Amino acid sequence: MKPLLSRALGPSALVATVATIVLGLFVTPPDVVQGELARLLYVHPAVAWVALYLSLGTATVASALYLWPRTRSMVADRVAEAAMEVSVVFVALTLVTGSIWGRPAWGVWWVWDARLTSTAVLGILTLGYLALRRANDDPLVRARRSAVLALVSAANVPIVHFSVLWWKTLHQGATVFTENRDITVHGSMAWTLLLSFIAFSLDFGWLVRARYRIATSLSTNFDRELDVALATRRTEDAS
Amino acid sequence: MIRLALFIARKELRIEWRSRVLVWQVLPFSVMAMVIAGLAIGPDESTGRRLAPGLMYLIITLVALQVIGRSHAADDARDTAVSVAMLGIDGGANYLGKVFALFAHLVVVTSALVTVDAVVFHLRFEEVLRGIPFIALSLAAIASAGVLYAALTRGSASLLPVLALPALAPVVMAGERTLTAIFHGGVVSRWVVLLAVITAVYGALGVLLYGAVEES
């Protein structure tokens, strides 16, 4: 029997995502300045939140737990791998949704802006993480090296986060967590924005859980196949 | 730790001194790459001066990729990593030693590269002199990141550019902007801070985590 929280994750992610779509597309009003284009507000920031903070944060914590001798376990390694895979998808979604917004707003699909460039670099680093995992067959070597790479990659997150403050960029600054706490989004738009963050966070949780289960099954199958192969070899030797 | 690091660095430099790969292979490649870049851009002086910093950093990065993996490849060829592990040498000291050696290698190549860059793209002597401390800082950043990535990709050399290039992208960008600011006017402080932070962060992570990577 699965725990209640685990069973509730999928349905609640689905409900929250559908509610975000309905509220974002049909209930909230268009923006005074940006019109219908502002509806991307209910996707892009939440997707970026998952890509840069939630998934990379999860991968970083799991990797640190793996490297720390007292907390070392393959569970931490699998969680880090799952979170990093989900991060690749969400970084790609961040760049795509940003690009869709950029075309009508800035007139171009892509611009060499500090936030965009640093996000793309981080995306390539997360792809590198997955490439590194596939380059090592030994599970222990793979786990250790990828844990170190996850920590090193996480060092780039502050560069992405502060890029809009450090450099002159086209990308807008914070809307909610502004320096003088002057929130520039209100009413149904604010609530839908908040819901989108919850919905995509739940989606992230569900995806990581699903990926973790696949990784566990693969590992179990591998062990089973190894046992069968060893038993066959022993039988051959005995005969 | 520093004494041990200097000992490791001396070992690395001695290996290089005996093989002379840097002098006979990497150095000619870097100079040729710069000359070919000059040919591709053409004789226009203003275009050359504008592109010189970026081209120099691009070639430094390509050269660094060649040099970065060499130390670990040499270790693997001679099973040095096993000997170092059996001697119980601290991972942090080993990392720092390799960083010092890689920095020295990059300084040698970059010295030649800067000279060719100045000649081919008509840079002024005093401009180049003012840029040297900042170039040295970029090389320190490349060395501190490079050694860590080389260790991570040990045994799969084709993976090194995949991991190291995006990681070195901020260094290339900050280095290019710094030199452009020196040559054409502008603020350098922000880029210098970024280079210093990258060097410090990779240095700290390297000292802390290199042992864990080598253990694997």
Image (spheres, rainbow, N blue to C red):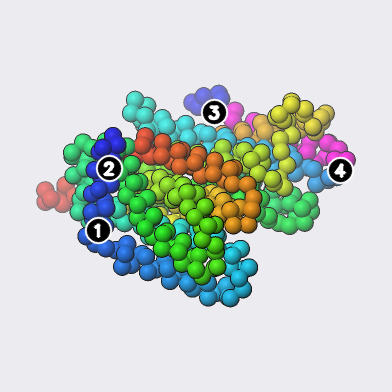
Q: From the viewer's perspective, is A218 left or right of A12?
A: left
Which residue is painted at 54% across and 57% down in the image?
Answer: B127
Q: Which mark is residue A76?
A: none
Q: CA distance from mark 3 to mark 2?
A: 53 Å
**Gap in angstroms between the C-alphas marked 1 and 4:** 65 Å
Q: Is residue B148 left or right of residue B49?
A: left
SS at badge 2 = helix
Q: Spatial distance from mark 3 to mark 1, Cα to Cα?
A: 60 Å
**Which residue in the protein does label 4 denote?**
A33
| Residue at disc 4, secondary structure | loop
Query: Mark 2 = which residue?
Result: B6
Q: Amino acid at mark 4?
A: Val
Whether residue A133 appears in this view of the structure is no
The residue under the point 61% across, 52% down is B181
Region of the chain picked out in magenta, as a range: A8-32
Indicate the position of residue B106 as horizontal and vertical percent values.
38, 55
Report the mark closest to the observer, 3 or 1: 1
Which chain does tag 2 point to? B
- Residue that label 3 marks: A6
Give the CA separation, mark 4 to mark 2. 61 Å
> Residues at marks 1 and 2, common chain?
yes
Q: Residue furthest top?
A: A4
Q: Quadrant of the N terminus of chain B?
A: top left
Assess whether residue B64 is covered by the magenta stretch.
no
Mark 1 residue element: helix
| Tag 3 subunit | A
Q: Which mark is residue B17?
A: 1
Compared with residue B204, is residue A70 higher up or lower down, i.e. above or below?
above
Q: Do discs 3 and 2 belong to a common subunit? A: no
- The disc, 3 or 4, on the residue closer to the chain's N-terminal end is 3
